[in-house]
Amino acid sequence: MDTVFIGEHLTPGHLGQFFIILSFGTALLSTISYYFATTQTDKLDQSWFRLGRLSFYINTISVVAIGCCLFYIIYNHLFEYHYAWAHSSRTLPVYYIISSYWEGQEGSFWLWTFWQAVLGNILIWKAKSWEKPVMTVISLSQVLLSSMLIGVEVFGARVGSSPFILLRNAIEAPIFSQPGYLAFIKDGNGLNPLLQNYWMVIHPPTLFLGFASMIIPFAYAVAGLWQRRYKEWIAAAIPYALFAVMILGTGIIMGSFWAYESLNFGGFWNWDPVENASVIPWLILIAAVHVMIVYKNSGHSYFTATFLTLLSFVLVLYASFMTRSGILGETSVHAFTDLGMFWHLVIDVVVFFAIMVGLLIWRWKELPINKKEEETYSREFWMFVGSAFLALSCLQLVIVTSIPVWNAMFKTNIAPPANPITLYNFFQAGFAFVVTLFLGFSQFLKYKKTDTTRFFITTLVYMVVAALVTGLIIYITGLYKLKFVFMLAMFGAVYGILANAKILSEALKGKFKLAGSAVAHIGFALLLVGALIAAGTSKVVSQNETGVIQVKDFDKAGDARENIMLYKNQPVQMADYKVTYIGDSLVAPNHYFKVDYKRYGADGKLTEHFVLKPNSQANAKFGLVSSPDTKHYLLHDLYTHITAAPIKEEENMAAGTTEDGHEHEANDDKNYEPPVAYEIGLGDTIRYREGYVILRSLNKQPKLQNIPLTGSDVAVGAVLEIVAHDIKYLAEPVFMIKGGNSFDFPRKVADAGLKLRFSKIIPKENKFEITLYQQPEREKAYIVMRAINFPYINFFWSGTIIMVIGFVMSIFRRNKELKVV
Amino acid sequence: MKKSSILGIVVIAIAIAVIISTYSNTSTYGSFKDAEKTQDELHIVGHLNKGKQLYYEPTKDANYFSFYMLDKKGEECKVVFTGTKPQDFERSEQIVLTGQMRGKEFHASKILMKCPSKYTQDKIETTEATATKQANI
């Protein structure tokens, strides 16, 4: 038990663990202090308030210190710590150390507490009279989050999971009984190659900033109910809610872009439970923002605004429960596994859910609910209806994604839908149609009351124009092949763009206030247009038509033959392109496959030529991991990725060393078909399966390494020109007589699938014997790849950017309206 | 009737429709025997029969991969997947298939497998392979 281990650096871990406990303690103290500061009646006593602030400051400092300790450990490759060992390696470049930081659950929890601490400080600075109640809620959330990192046993159950746990404590293995075990642990597991992407450096922080900032509207709602400041909290919370929506939306789309650029499922959105988990709270908060604005402008829908705001943060916690507890198990590819925090995460959800329900019941009678009916022709009414539909779309996501949760709760055994993507697309397109339609025509309505005849005329005119434009788009892109609901969604999106463009043009003339929402709406609708076309009409260009039996219902997956095999240097016609696998380049640890695309015009002229380099990494830990490469055009993308290739890890490790195997000569011949010897003269040609070989000349002084030639020795090189599939290679096998014995040195031309020997000189006939070893077809290098054409995907990305700009404009506007007291 | 009550009814109606459609669209977990009885796609949990050969010969057909799987009841069946062999398939310790029976073969449209990581015992990795996802949004 009392083994003294050699070479361990325990200080950073102890220090880190100390700061974890400190951050937990100060968060707790801050919660209690702010609570009493809020409830106390003596307004002159500032002691609780000061204590609350002070402990939150210390909390912030300790959270930063935890981060520093963890960074020190990973940066210095201290593999005695499980976290460093599991998520990083010596070969990892510094900028990816940052991504390895949040590969694990503990790191991502830390990121969340970090952002929450930053936001807390901003609120201390900005919130003024709201500070006490709002900070009580934020500190409480900080308590629960930092408890996730504690990793201490309490009553036999481990609470949380610490990033500073030692390897020898985390894993049981006989090796850890040796004092010098550390000497055997040379390197860590390394970072999953898929995360070695620049988007992975920036996507998680953005996403977690989004999640963290969703506490602010929640905290304001709680504060409003608690302090009976029912009406005021809404105006104060709107800018923060907009900020959260903007950041979370950006984070989600960044993840989508990362998936598109470096994952191989062939798309930008997969309705994976992990993706859904981040969209669910986002949609609810968007609905909440709209209803909050409704309340602010009309005094209607108070309960819905409060309810949705509170719900959005509870759903953030529910999402983190789903992705982190391991409950998704069999339904998701990239959910975290259970770290023993299942009930801890449940408690987190339950606590905040109880706060929400408890407050609403407690204050129910006092809520300023407007008993008067909304006008049918008023903007607020349709904004409200639209928000209800957003919430419904979210409900569908929650119900389907939570199937494993229902199973766990009701002890059932329901499997997720066999084709979840089709199901989600169908429903979400339907909801998107309704929502976009509303975000279109509600622009023509005014708050409170609108002149109906004028409204109907403008709405109708825009509808007709939108229908025409939609018809044109559907015709050009081939969207008509899909279900009707997708065409409806397209119509809604186009209508939304047109209606909001009108508002934008008016706004630019003077009513600049309205520009923000119009821009955000245009961005959102544009995003939908891009998603619908790109996902709906994407086409696999590598479809293998040969020998396919046409199956009637093609969307019963399983029969499309989407992969194409390419032998090295053998061009294959693939849709409009002539595609050739021309070679490899190795930049350890990545193996890039060069795929040459050529496109010819009708007249046979080369119109386009480019090389894509999809890569694979034969990783010891993660197996073969492939990343696609994409050719971006203005109006479409051509996406290519490797689905199978005969590469091994060792091969990659030997990157850069040239093959020159004298020792394996005998074995090596087995890789070829039986040799054929040819007697030829200068300038003669040998034909073989893939091309021909010409004996150009003889080289009397070939270069031979480490073999000194004495007077009577002779060495001659045969200069051979090889042409295979229109590509020229040169090779010079050497024939040598040394000390009366003859030797020869073969040369390989891997790309032409050849090994060549200069096996004999026949001086009488002035002929030379060249022995040809051909590689059999199946031994030759090949790749199996899939190529997909994504039309108009740039609408999707540009829509996102426009939407974010719209949010920024709205934040500035709402912030200006606000006079914080 | 008040507008808000109409709206409330509409919202509730849609919510119920969503729940019913979700329930009717869910699949079931079953065995190969169940798969023989039905035309619907279903999920089968089981593990690879490592004693029998995996067949994937990209030089002959890059889109054909077959293997033998034992379901939870121990019944064996040949499984055909139209696609490439998922990496590290040999190492999988649990497989979840989605698909249907065609004759004596089970045609999988989706394979989800769990692999024990080579080095960490405390972590299970999951990967997924899908035969096709295009053109059926």
Image (cartoon, rainbow, N blue to C red):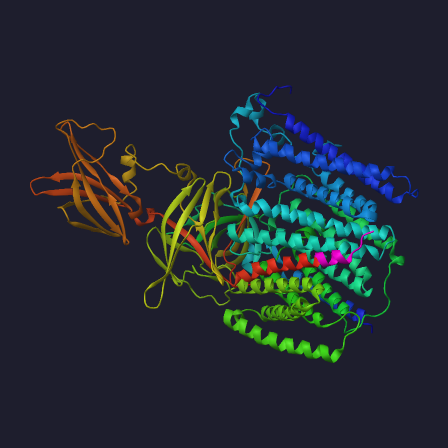
A291 and B16: which is toward the camera: A291
Considering the whole magenta stretch, tell me its main secondary structure.
helix
A27 sits to left or right of A486: right
Q: Position of residue A329 (x, y in %)?
A: 62, 47
Answer whether residue A413 is magenta in the image. Answer: no
A246 and A271: which is toward the camera: A246
A360 and A469: which is toward the camera: A469
Q: Is residue A112 above or below residue B31?
A: above
Q: Position of residue A519 (x, y in %)?
A: 65, 63
Q: Which residues are magenta?
A: A811-821
- Residue at the right extreme of this rendering: A42
Q: Is residue A389 above or below residue A808?
A: below
Work out whether residue B60 can be spotted. no
| Residue A499 picture quarter | bottom right
Q: Residue at x 54, y 65 (%)?
A: A533
Quadrant containing the N terminus of chain A is: top right
- Residue at the left extreme of this rendering: A764
Q: Position of residue A750 (x, y in %)?
A: 30, 44
Give the number of marks: 0
| Residue A87 picture quarter | top right
Q: Is residue A599 above or below residue B112?
A: below
- Residue at the front extreme of this rendering: A510
Q: Position of residue A445 (x, y in %)?
A: 73, 72
| Residue A305 picture quarter | bottom right
Work out whether residue A482 can be spotted. yes
